[in-house]
Amino acid sequence: MPNMSAIFCAIAIFSSALADARAQSGGYVIQTPGRLPTNVNPTPGGGYILQTPGQVPTNIVPTGQGGYIVQTPGQAPTNITPMPGGGYRSQSPGR
């Protein structure tokens, strides 16, 4: 399972500065204390790829409604949608 704290950090960072993230050619590094660093790089389609050493890369693809789809090979995609009043809801198929 992908590091969900890194995914939520990435979404929080990029949802507040989406235009800046798309314009940059480089990425970011997110490191939760006690865990390996996660490299976050923008993709040409407006999404992001998260790469943590020793793990399968995770793709974050924006939806048209302000949310994201988190895709990790071999796992069901997770939908992250904004909630009224703030915050995000994480939903996997069948849950």
Image (tube, rainbow, N blue to C red):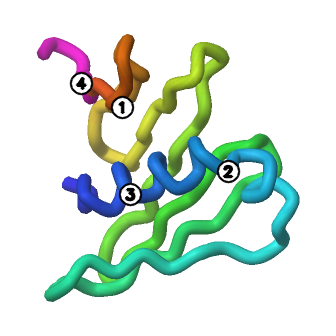
Magenta stretch holds residue 93: yes
Q: Residues within 10 Å of mark 1 (few under 14, many from 20)?
A: some
Mark sitting earlier along the chain (3/1): 3
Task: Kindly indicate whether the residue at mark 1 contacts the one at mark 2 (C-beta within 8 angstroms).
Answer: no
- In the image, is 45 to the left or to the right of 56? right
Amino acid on which disc 1 is placed: Pro
Asked if residue 25 lies in the magenta stretch, the reply is no
Q: CA distance from mark 4 to mark 2?
A: 26 Å
Q: Amino acid at mark 4?
A: Ser
Give the spatial CA distance, label 3 vs label 1. 18 Å
* Residue position for label 1: 77
Residue assigned mark 4: 92
Numbered disc 4: secondary structure: loop
Q: Which kind of residue does numbered mark 3 sit on?
A: Cys
Q: Measure the C-alpha gap from mark 3 to mark 4.
A: 18 Å
Q: Position of residue 21 (x, y in %)?
A: 73, 58
Q: Position of residue 12 (x, y in %)?
A: 46, 49
Q: Which badge, 4 or 2, is on the more N-terminal residue?
A: 2
Q: Position of residue 72 (x, y in %)?
A: 38, 48
Q: Nearer the viewer, mark 4 or mark 2?
A: 2
48 vs 71: above or below: below
Which badge, 3 or 4, comes first in the chain's sequence? 3
Name the chief secondary structure element in magenta.
Answer: loop
Mark 2 to mark 3: distance in Å?
Answer: 13 Å
Local SS, label 3: helix
Q: For the residues carrying marks 2 and 1, which lies nearer the camera in this image? A: 2
Query: Foreground: 28 or 49?
Result: 28
The span shown in magenta is 90-95
Q: Which mark is residue 17?
A: 2
Q: Which mark is residue 9?
A: 3
Residue 11 rendering spot, x and y as whole percentages? 47, 47
Mark 2 to mark 1 CA distance (whole Å): 24 Å
